[in-house]
């Protein structure tokens, strides 16, 4: 049985779109499940669209997400080079093979001539019905062709597609796709201008030479699949033709059209894994990492956009995804990009995270708010974040929910003061101080019954007293269980805060 070898082949033309990340993920899951290899190939044949920093961005994004690469520009391997711009000599050999076999031909039409033909002929296509009226090596004498080449005229090599052939594409998601070759144009395979092939030729040659067994890519490449089948046939490589897999599109949140950066800008969610700084415009685009998403949450979220396990399960660790993934459960229809669901996944992973690990992620947030994390024990920080993490979607949200553990309140929520701080409340809080001072064991389990019994014995209003208590300690009437808070703060800090509240909170007018 042929060894599974898959490739993710992005172009370094800008930041990696989240749809490309999902394609990389599905390649990775399948390769790991089958004990195969994952290749990262940089398709940089279009030199006019190259963007500095894009290749580094791609590698960093995959590394952050935990999508492991077995062979690539950084990793090396036996099938390199893994950057197409470094494979010029290889492509020239295969262009010549097609030309010598009469499977391709030179074309000398200028851009102006092609534009004129398009203006003249509605829905013009360079194919078997029009090629003989154009300037190419099929319509021109051989000596004239050679003279143009020798004279340095720019040329391209086009693939010669024979008309009226049924081309069969076997796709693991879509089944048999049949296309009549007459609808295909004679695609440009090579350009003398930059001495590089186009995507179509480079893609086929590299997949063959790198022994790629499965080509797993986005649905947008499905129209090119028949051409690629014909190229495999033209080279005589039908025995090594890969299995095609065309994934469903990622759609806008409303399902109407392909997901774009504009959708993210409009609705306030990232469409790139990492923040991107455009080297030309200086524009900054948000990224999932910088927005506070956990990589494992992003992976889980993306995995379920176009695939499902066949049941209602939603939370999958990466090892579970590798075990469960199958193309049989991939949808043919596009998947709506529910960015709110992405937040839900992040909430679930943040809530399940070990408190000590979460505390380390929270320390930079503390620093952003002017709090020195080294002033607190790691165990204390872990306790604080552990008490509030279920209320948060992102690490940055922790601050608004647990800041009072690190900074004593000096202002108090007006709406809570109006509702909970009445005439005589300061006297009751002074009594409470006396009760707390007499408690030796300040744990929540020991403190709670003593305080509640005191409230009942004096027939005080339970809600008013406890909320006034919370107001002095937290600064507003929110937060975890009150006695868990006081246990974490300790007796001295709790009493100090009550005293400060008595001094500073006045009943509303």
Image: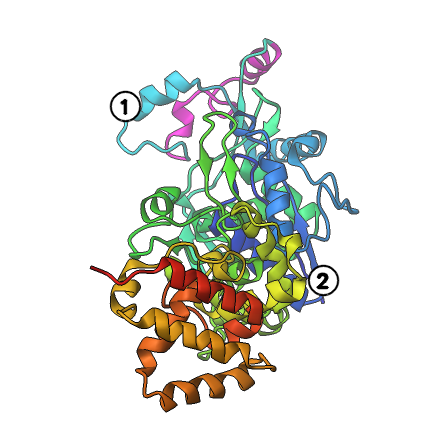
Residue labelled with disc 1: 119
Q: Is residue 134 magenta?
A: yes
Q: Quadrant of residue 384?
A: bottom right
* Residue occupying the point 48% across, 40% down: 161
Q: Where is residue 394 in the image (x, y as percent from the top left)?
A: 48, 58
Residue 29, above or below 94: below
Q: Does the magenta stretch include residue 182?
A: no
Q: Can residue 74 be seen in this view?
A: yes
- Give how far apart the Cα atoms at labels 2 and 1 are: 49 Å
Residue labelled with disc 2: 3
Q: Residue furthest right?
A: 78
Q: Residue furthest left?
A: 509
What are the residue bounds of the magenta stretch? 128-150
Q: Quadrant of residue 340?
A: bottom left
Question: The residue tagged with tag 1: helix, strand or loop?
Answer: helix
Q: Position of residue 15 (x, y in %)?
A: 52, 40
The local crowd at label 2, few if under 14, some if 14 to 19, many if 20 or more residues have their Cα within 10 Å, is: some
* Residue occupying the point 43% across, 58% down: 248
Q: In which quarter of the image is the C terminus?
A: bottom left
């Amino acid at each position: 049985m042929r060894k599974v070898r898959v490739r993710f082949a992005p172009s370094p033309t800008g930041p990696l779109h989240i749809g490309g990340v999902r394609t990389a993920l599905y390649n990775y899951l399948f390769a790991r499940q089958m004990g195969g290899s994952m290749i990262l190939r940089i398709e940089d044949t279009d030199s006019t669209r190259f963007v500095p920093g894009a290749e580094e961005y791609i590698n960093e994004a995959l590394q952050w997400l935990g999508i492991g690469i077995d062979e690539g520009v950084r990793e090396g391997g036996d099938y390199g080079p893994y950057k197409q711009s470094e494979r010029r000599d290889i492509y020239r050999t295969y262009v010549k093979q097609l030309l010598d076999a009469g499977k391709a031909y030179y074309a000398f039409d200028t851009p102006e001539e092609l534009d004129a033909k398009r203006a003249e002929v509605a829905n013009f296509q360079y194919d078997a019905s029009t090629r003989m009226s154009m300037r190419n090596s099929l319509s021109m004498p051989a000596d004239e062709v050679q003279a143009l080449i020798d004279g340095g005229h720019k040329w391209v090599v086009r693939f010669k597609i024979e008309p009226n052939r049924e081309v069969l594409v076997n796709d693991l998601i879509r089944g048999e796709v049949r296309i009549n070759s007459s609808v295909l144009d004679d695609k440009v395979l090579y350009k003398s201008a930059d001495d590089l092939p186009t995507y179509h030729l480079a893609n086929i040659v590299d997949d063959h030479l790198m022994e790629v067994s499965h080509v797993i890519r986005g649905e947008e490449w499905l129209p090119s699949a028949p051409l690629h089948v014909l190229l495999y046939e033209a080279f005589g490589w039908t025995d090594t033709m890969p299995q095609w897999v065309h994934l469903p599109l990622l759609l806008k949140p409303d399902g109407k059209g392909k997901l774009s950066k504009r959708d993210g800008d409009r609705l306030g969610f990232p469409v790139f894994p990492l923040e991107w700084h455009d080297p030309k415009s200086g524009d900054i685009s948000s990224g999932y990492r910088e927005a506070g998403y956990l990589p494992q949450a992003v992976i889980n979220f993306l995995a379920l956009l176009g695939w499902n396990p066949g049941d209602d399960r939603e939370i999958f660790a990466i090892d579970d995804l590798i075990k469960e993934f199958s193309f049989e459960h991939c949808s043919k229809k596009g998947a709506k990009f529910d960015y709110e669901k992405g937040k839900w996944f992040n909430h679930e992973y943040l809530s399940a995270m070990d408190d000590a690990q979460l505390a380390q992620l929270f320390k930079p947030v503390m620093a952003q708010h002017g709090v020195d994390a080294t002033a607190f024990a790691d165990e204390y920080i872990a306790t604080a974040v552990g008490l509030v993490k279920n209320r948060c979607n992102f690490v940055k949200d922790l601050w608004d929910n647990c800041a009072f553990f690190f900074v004593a309140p000096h202002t108090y929520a007006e709406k809570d003061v109006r509702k909970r701080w009445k005439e005589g409340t300061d006297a009751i809080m002074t009594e409470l101080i006396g009760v707390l001072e007499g408690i030796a064991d300040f744990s929540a389990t020991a403190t709670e019954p003593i305080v509640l019994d005191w409230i009942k014995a004096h027939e005080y209003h339970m809600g008013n007293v406890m909320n006034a208590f919370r107001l002095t300690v937290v600064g507003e009437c929110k937060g975890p269980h009150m006695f868990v808070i006081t246990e974490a703060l300790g007796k001295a800090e709790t009493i100090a805060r009550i005293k400060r509240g008595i001094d500073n909170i006045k009943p509303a007018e």
